Amino acid sequence: MEAFAPGEVVYALNPRYKDGTRLRRGPAADAGFNGVWVPNDVRLEIHAVDAAAGFAEVAKPDGARGWIRTRNLTRTARVAGVTRDVVTTEIVTPDPEYVRGIKIYNLGIKEDPVPGQKFGKGLQHLISSTWLTAMSEFVGAHVPQLQAFARHAHAGAAAHPGYDFVYFANTANQLFNRAEVAALRTTESRQLFLMATWLVMAAAEVDDFPFHKYTAAQRAAQRAEFYAAYLTPGPGPGAPDSRDVPRDDASVLGPFAVPLARRDLLPPIAMERLGINNELSALKYADAAAPLRDGFRLSTRIDSLKRHFEALHRRLTDEDHAIHLLWNFHAIYHVAVLFPDLNDLVDYQAARRGHAAAAPPPRYEPTTSRQQIAGRALPPSAVLKLDWNEGAIPPPPSVGAALTHFVQAADGAYLKWYPHLGGGAELRAALAAYVGVIEENLLVSNGSDDALVMICHRYLGPGRVALAPVPTYEHFCVDVTATGATLQRLDLADPFVADPDELAAAIERVQPTLVYLVSPTNPTGVEWTADHLADLATRYPDVVFLVDEAYHEFATPDAAGRPATCAPLAVAHRNVLCTRTFSKAFCLASVRCGYVVAHPTTIDELRAYYNPKGVNQFAQIAAVAALREVDGYYRPYIARTHAARAGFVADLAARGVTVRTGGAGNFVCVEVPGGDTAELCRRLDAEAIYVRDLGARFPGHVRITIGLEMSRVADAIVAALAAMAAPGAAVT
C-alpha cells in the first residue's frame, strides 16, 4: 500500500474493536490515551506521519487531534450495503474480530475493498466431506440421467426463458417430498434426496437472482457453461468419449480404489454460493462447525428447507433462497448418514407396511415332487428326481453306519441329550482341514439356509438394500425382505455370463449394503471367480459380498483339480463371506448341515444371531463321516457329474434342443420353444422324471439336475418337445 502523506483525507477502521480506537498523545503505543476517541468510519485529515513508528497524527471533523496507527486507516469509505436492483441484503456478524456493522453480502465483489470488510470469495470450508463424497459419486453414477434433465431444461428454456429454473425447482421439490415419505431411512430415499440436491444446484446455476459480483452477461455465460458441461461432458466416467476406458485395477489400488466419481461436474456457481454461505456462517456463529460435528434433529432443517422451497417457487429475492436450500440439503444428508439417531422424521412407508395386515411379506413356496413319488409307490430306481439339485447317488455306506452306531450306542441313550455345541469340535476340525482355514474362520450352521438368515439379520434391516443378479436362489430373497430391507434384482444382459463391470455399475447405482452372488449360480451355472470378487471387494469396501457356494464342489476345477472358490478372499477380507452346504455334492440334504467361511472378526459378529445347538447330532456325525470320504467316494462322483453334464448338453444340442449353462454346477437349463414350461414338466412327470419349472422367474426355461446316466432324460425331453410341437398337440 502507498504510504500516507500529510493533507490526505482518510477513514478510521479498527476491526478488533467494535467502537473504533483511542488516539495517542504521541507516535508510540506507550504514549498514552489523550482523551480523544475515534469511532470507526469517521472521516479524518492527516497532519503528520511517523512512517518508522507506523503512526499518523490526524484531526477529527470537530478539530480534536491525536496519533493513530496507520494500519487503522483506509483511503476507501465503507459502503453501508450492496444494492441489487431494489433489494439490499445484509447480515451483521457479532464476531468480536469484526467491527459491529461490517456487512457480509451473499456473493459480494471479488476482493475486499477495505481490510476487514468481508464480501465473500467463495471459500469452501464447512462443506461436509460426507456430502461432497456422496454427491461426487452420485454424479459419476448418474451422468446419463443428469444429462436427460439438463437436455429437457435447456430445450424448454430456449422456447420459454426461465423454464429451466422452474423445471429444476419443481422436480427437486417433488423428489424431496418422495424422499421425506421414507424419512431418508432407505437407500432409495437417499438416492432421491441426492438427485433433488443436484436439481437445486442446477436451479442455482440458471436462476436470475441479482448479484453484485456478477453482471447479467456473466451469469448468462455461466448458465451456458453449465449446460455445456452436462450436454457434452468432457473426459471422465460417463462421458461419451470415455465409455470404453477400462476401470483402474482395484486389486492393485487396494484402499485407494473408489467408485466412479465426477467432482469436476458438480455445478460450480452452486458450489461457490454454498461456500459463501458457509463463510458467512463461520463469521456469524461462534461455532459454525457444530451442526456438522454434533448433528441436529432433522425435522428442524426439513422445516427450514420447505420454507425456502416456498420462497423459491414465489421467486423471492429478499435473500438467496437457493443457497439456503442447498445448505439444508447438504447438512441434512450429512446428519442422516452420520447421526441416524437424530433422524426424527416419520417413515410413512414403514408405518403403512406395519398396518397393512392384508399385504404380508412374500413367502418362499417351493414345489416338491416327494408327495407325487410317494403316491405312485414307485421304487427309487424307477424315479429320476431331478428337480431340487440333490445328489444323484446315496452317501457312502460309512455315513449310514456312523448314524446307525450313534442311534444304537448305549441303547439309544445319547438321543436324549442336546448336540455338541457349535457343530462340535470334531466337525469343526475336519471342516478346517477340508476348506484349508483355521477353525476361527468357520461357523457351522443348520444347513446353509440358516447361515443366510443369520447374515441377513446381521447386515440388513429397514433402510438397507441387498442386490442380487437374477435368476437366483429365491429363498434368500425372502430372507432379505423379512428383515425389512429392500431387494434389488439385477437382470444381467446375459444371465449365463458373469459380468463384473455390469455388477459394479449396479453397485454404484443402487448403493447396496449387501451383494448376494451364488457361485456356481442356481440355475444358470455362472461362476463369480475370486478375481472378480477381489476387485469388487477392494473397490467397494463398505459393501458386504455374500457368496453362496452351495454348489462349490461342482465348480470348475483348477489345474490341481480343486474346485474354484472365494473362500480365501473371505478369510482375508472382512466384507466377504462364503456359505456352503452338505446338501448337494455330499448327498446329505436330509440331515441339514452347512457352514460359513469368513474373517474371524466377522464370525464373532455373527455369533450374536447364532444358536449354538442348532446343528443336530445326526448332521454332525454324517458330515464328519462324509468328509473322510472326499477323495475315495465324492471326487469320482463329482468328476462323473461333470462328464455327464457335458454329454447331456452335447446330446440334446445334436438333436436340436437348446441347453444353456454357465459351465458349472450339477444342473443345466433347457429352453422350451413357445415357453410352455409347465406342459413339458407335466409330460416328463408322466415318465417319472421330475424337473424344475422355472417359468415364473426365468421364463421359457426348466432346470434339470444332472444324474450319472442322462440318456433316458434326453430321450424323454426330445419326445416331449416333438409332441408339443406337433400340429394339434393336446395340452394336458
Image (spheres, rainbow, N blue to C red):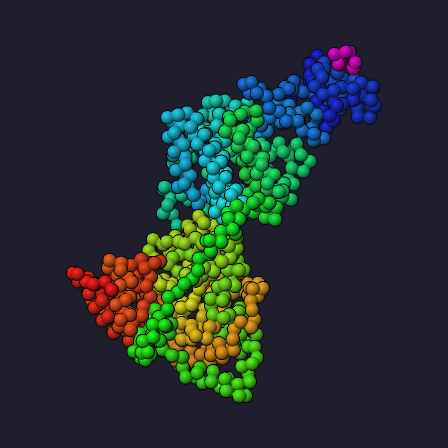
Q: Is residue 270 magenta?
A: no
Q: Quadrant of the C terminus?
A: bottom left
180 vs 220: above or below: below
Secondary structure mostly seen in magenta is loop
Decide if residue 466 is in sight here. Answer: no
Provide residue 155's location: percent of width, then percent of height.
Answer: 37, 30
Provide residue 599's location: percent of width, then percent of height.
Answer: 53, 64
Q: Residue furthest left?
A: 727
In screen coordinates, is 480 left or right of 21?
left
Magenta region: 59-65
Provide residue 372's location: percent of width, then percent of height.
Answer: 34, 72
Image quadrant in which you'd find residue 371: bottom left
Q: Residue at x 37, y 66 (%)?
A: 367
Q: Residue at x 64, y 34 (%)?
A: 282
Which residue is more in the foreground, 165 or 693? 693
Q: Residue at x 44, y 51 (%)?
A: 507
324 vs 649: above or below: above
Q: Which residue is drawn at 38% across and 47% down?
A: 245
